[in-house]
Image (cartoon, rainbow, N blue to C red):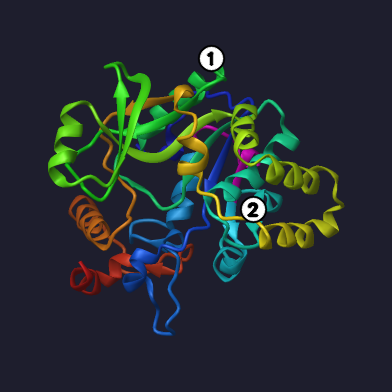
Amino acid sequence: MSLQRWETHWDAGHNWALILAGGEGTRLQALTRMASGIAVPKQFCSLGHSGSLLHDAVTRASLVGSPEQTMIAVSEHHRRWWQNLDLPIPGRNLISQPSNRGTAPGILLPLLRILHRDPEASILLLPSDHYVSNELVLAASLREAMSEVVRTPESMLLLGMTAEEADPELGYIVAEGAGDVAAVRDFVEKPDAATARALIARGGVWNSFIFAVNGQHLLRRFERTCPDLVGEMRHIVTRTPAAAQAYRLAELYARSATIDFSRDILQRDPDSLRVLKVPACGWSDLGTPRRVIETVRKIKSQAAEFASHAEPSAFLNLAGRMPAMCAAG
């Protein structure tokens, strides 16, 4: 059953989805570089079985919120890619970052725009470069996470993927307790294989960087770490005339420090972090050539038909580059 046909009378209410689509995908540039020498960011690429990875993320987001309550954060220097995509959301929900100042500003700007429109918003943050073989399993967990945030608005709920192998290239979350929802005890980034196996044996899960959170709670986290940035950006979003906002934002970004969301915002206040353990669903963040190769092979082995050309909604079909992938991997 496809996600589009999974109908359970879900009430989106104040649920918003925020999709991060501003990454460079530098580790995959050997696979995504075109004949012109320009590398296509992976979120605008296809795996050969559907549209772009960004389109997959929008479909994922549609299970918790409406198109009017889905925002996508993109990078201005990627305009050549995103401006020509047929994305099923309102144009004003496409938020362009003037420059790259780390993942924190990339989340803060659309967060402020969401809260300006809906102060009661609960937000699901989704990266745009993931593959999931069993979307229905993940969809159930996404909805559970959003419901849990409504019940406990003073905590942030991270989605931890059941580890299907001891992958040393991923981050791990160690939970405090054995339930499906538990307190976060520790984060371990890219452990060696032996350590990864030990973490899994202790109930460790992969850090997907998918999380659900009450919007006001997330804003307070930003205010504790970078109050000046929050104040200036809020003024631009809420009080500056629309015609001047792009200029003011570019000016602010130009003099702002780079801030990493995971390190500088998320992990500074671990007491309110919890993790929801997602059953095995064939998740991959497609972060390395090896994982892309493995994913494409899996899709080909499972699909009755497999596209041999790039979909109209993607700029590059990675599945069509299997020989290059194998050489790179």
Residue closer to the observer: 239 or 118: 239
Q: Return the disc, 1 or 2, that comes first in the chain's sequence.
A: 2
Q: Amino acid at mark 2?
A: Leu
Segment tinted magenta in the rendering: 62-72
Q: Nearer the viewer, mark 1 or mark 2?
A: 1
In percent of width and height, residue 85 lies at: 56, 62
Q: Is residue 37 above or below residue 243?
A: below
**Image quarter for residue 34?**
bottom left
Q: Amino acid at mark 1?
A: Arg
Q: Mark 1 highlights which residue?
A: 151
Residue furthest to the bottom in view is 36
Q: Secondary structure beneath disc 1?
A: helix
Residue closer to the observer: 121 or 152: 152
In percent of width and height, residue 72 lies at: 58, 49
> Mark 2: few, some, or many residues within 10 Å (few <14, many ≥20)?
some
Q: How many marks?
A: 2
User: Could you tell whether 228 is left or right of 57 in the image?
Assistant: right
Q: Mark 2 highlights which residue?
A: 94
> Mark 1: few, some, or many residues within 10 Å (few <14, many ≥20)?
few
Q: Is residue 104 above or below residue 309?
A: above
Residue 204 shows in the view: yes
Quadrant of the snapshot with the C terminus: bottom left
Residue closer to the observer: 321 or 269: 269
Residue appearing at x 45%, y 39% in the figure: 4
Q: Secondary structure beneath disc 2?
A: strand
